[in-house]
Amino acid sequence: MKRWRLIICLAAAILLVAWAPQASPASQADNPNPPDRPVKLIFIHHSTGENWLTDGYGDLGLLLAENNYFVSDTNYGWGPDAIGDRTDIPNWTEWFASGQTPTYMDALFSESGQHAGYTRLFDDPGGENIIIMFKSCFPNSDLAGNPEDPAGTYEELSVAGAKYVYNRILQFFATRPDKLFVVITAPPLSDRSNAENARAFNNWLVEEWLEENNYPFNNVAVFDFYNILTDRDAHHWYQDGQVERILGDDDTLAYPSGDDHPSRAGSQKATEEFIPLLNIFYHRWLAGSAQLPPVSAPPTSGDDAQSTSGSDGGDSSVPLPPEVVQVVDDFEADPGGWMTNWDASTSTTITCGIEQGAGSQGTAALRIDYAIAPGSWGACAWMFDAAQDWSAGEWLAYDVHAGQAGLPFQVALYGGTSEMMETYIHYRETPVEYPDGFVPFTSFWGEFQRVQWEENAGSPFENPGHVLGLAFGFDGYPDAPYTGTLWIDNITLQLTPAYDPAGDGNESGDDAGGGAGLPCLGSIILPLFFAGVGLIFKRR
């Protein structure tokens, strides 16, 4: 395990040297051309964003469609708990760093509706939204405090509070390198009372935010909507083969419309400059983020240690992703627990076992080869000798590599008792854009739902303190066989404080909760598994 973490830290260090979050001269990887296939994008916004999207005003929706993006959006009244009403900077922790985040993200990733007047040029290509754009409106440029304030300790509409919010939500973004998150800075106000603070905060967001947090993934980008609206000669664009951000001479709105909504001319300027940058952000993400290994938290002692609090107690360096509390299986030792089951009445075959040299760090991984007959099923599962206490973890993490993109699979957890097991499934799919290598996946407990043929169907998994088993399963297509290979590595529980809904920084430590080490093969539960697992995947 120490060797594994050392390799991760070295890899992260190399990546940090090679990649800078700040705008810089383009490398060969910078590609301003549209994606070569339709990409699903969703934009969280209110009125300024609606104007920006609308045909004949900002034209963003239409131009995105012309660049091969299938655009959806949210607005007032959207989503569970009407979360779409709340898009101020202090609200982003509710979206991305609260106990309701799994619910909101399920809705956001699957949303395909329109809430503004823009043109789509092609039909929904299917699957989840890949790009998540989000923006606060112009009142969020009225930030209290002082330009040089460090990150604070709670959400508020101030320089310190805004930095706190963005540091917090970055922790969630690190758990989803399969998505590209694009921050759109809030537009400027005409009132210059706190204009200096707004400029300083947005400079920090573009130039320092990711670097301060040692963020190693390419799945977060910032477009300085604020800056380009402050001066006719201010830009954030791709020009003469490089990405440039040219600051204006003022910090207030240079494109008024009669109020603080940016004018048609300002919105169209933003569209013209944003589209090539979005293409660059997309190609950078596609080329890099899905291939990166997980990273450990910064060291806590020695010359390389980083402070995790500022002078006011606020975070100045966020551990990303969180520390591992418990390794469920890194496949470096074969405990003999993984076993297969399948529909023996058909031609289905499935095998699973440890393959040396196939892991995400060149070590071992679980390899599953399956050929599922039409309408049939197969599974690779590990049933534990005794119920495992996984309550110290906020979610289950695992790395996945597949022979091709778009392969559906299921992750199953078993609860209940040995006499009456309960089955909860999270349906997944290998990413449509699938570079070579492993992709880190996360499954929050609430994303596992009770199967339809059991009591309380559709209810979320709520008892990670009592887990009887874990499985990866596959359904056959109704009229065609389903054949493929899936590799699984680094199945871990992730430490709850890294996804701390209260934001109070309480940490339980490496030994908090959890079962002891790797679980054992269950001699009592195993017969029940073979009796019932067929129904788990067969009756989807």
Image (tube, rainbow, N blue to C red):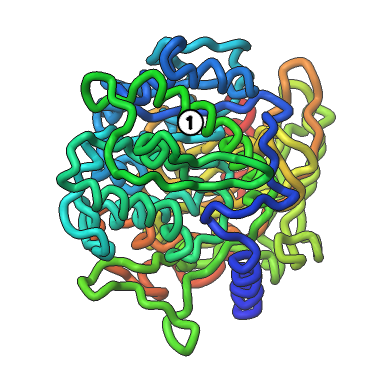
Residue 256, position in %: x, y? 28, 25
Q: Nearer the viewer, residue 35 or 3?
A: 35
- Name the residue at the bottom extreme: 302
Which residue sits at x=37%, y=56%? 204
Horizontal side of residue 301 vs 47, given as left or right? right
Which residue sits at x=60%, y=52%? 440
Which residue sits at x=37%, y=37%? 231
Describe the element under mark 1 as helix, strand or loop: helix
Horizontal side of residue 265 vs 376, given as left or right? left
Which residue sits at x=77%, y=66%? 362
Amino acid under disc 1: Phe
Could you tell me which quadrant the N terminus lies in? bottom right
Residue 72, position in %: x, y? 47, 21
- Which residue position is annotated with label 1? 109
On the image, which quarter does residue 234 sit in?
A: top left
Horizontal side of residue 338 vs 356, given as left or right? left
Could you tell me which quadrant the C terminus lies in? top right
On the image, which quarter does residue 91 sit in?
A: top left
**Circle 1: is it few (<14), some (14-19), or many (20+) Cα within 10 Å?**
some
Q: Is residue 471 above or below residue 22?
A: above
